[in-house]
Image (spheres, rainbow, N blue to C red):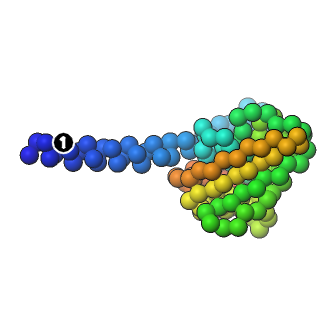
Amino acid sequence: MRAKLFALLTTIATGLLAVGAAHADNRFEADTTPTSGAKIGRAIINATGQIAPMLTCRENGKGSIDIAFVMPRNFVGNSSVGVTVRFDDAKPFKVFGTLRDQSVYLDHVMPKSPEGAVLVGLKTAKHVSVEIFDAAGNRVVDDFDLGDAAPLIEQSIETCGDTNWQ
């Protein structure tokens, strides 16, 4: 009897650890800017991957949400960079962002725009593939499950006070 109970508890614990570990790379962080006092909410998805989408804001209010695709190394160039995304089995599409440091930024993401489709996909899809090329032709690609990203994204939107998405 004890052996059966131990086996059952081990199976349950292993399942719980697998579920918890599957989405351990998603997290939410909150902060306040020291100069303006704006509340900043950051939803970071796939934090240890090659590309980590991050929702954030620099100010509060309507139109304040930005999406950054954070990469592990600097890219060449400082202009418009194409980002191809594919959610689940949908058709891939491309958006253009501004390259700054180790990230491609989609600034002031609005509903019913290509950039807005990225935010909607991050909230609703189960899986995403992302591909980014820089001006020198360097390529970064990542393919990952979104896991528990939706509530973290909602928390970021709420913290930033972007009523376009509430």
Is residue 63 positioned above or below 5 on the image? below
For image coordinates 60% across by 37% down, the residue present is 48
Figure check: 1 above or below 95:
above
Give the image quarter of residue 150. Answer: bottom right
* Number of marks present in the image shown: 1
Instruction: Pick the residue in front: 121 or 131.
Output: 131
Q: Is residue 23 left or right of residue 72?
A: left
Q: Residue at x 70, y 47 (%)?
A: 141
Residue marked by disc 1: 6
Frontmost residue, 65 versus 12? 12
Q: Is residue 103 left or right of residue 41?
A: right
| Helix, strand or loop at mark 1 | helix
Can you say whether 92 is above or below 28 in the image?
below
Q: Quadrant of residue 33?
A: top right
Picture coordinates of residue 116, whole percent (x, y): 74, 61
- State whether residue 158 appears in this view: no
Q: Residue at x 56, y 44 (%)?
A: 26
Most distant residue in the left direction:
1
Q: Pinpoint residue 85: horizontal percent, then vertical percent.
A: 72, 57
In percent of width and height, residue 127 lies at 59, 57
Depth check: 22 or 137 in front? 137
Q: Residues within 10 Å of mark 1 (few under 14, many from 20)?
A: few
Q: Residue 102 appears at what percent x and percent y?
A: 77, 36
Which amino acid lies under the numbered mark 1 shown in the image of this protein? Phe
Residues 90 and 95: in front is 90
**Quadrant location, the C terminus:** bottom right
Residue at left 59%, top 50%?
144
Residue 6 seen: yes
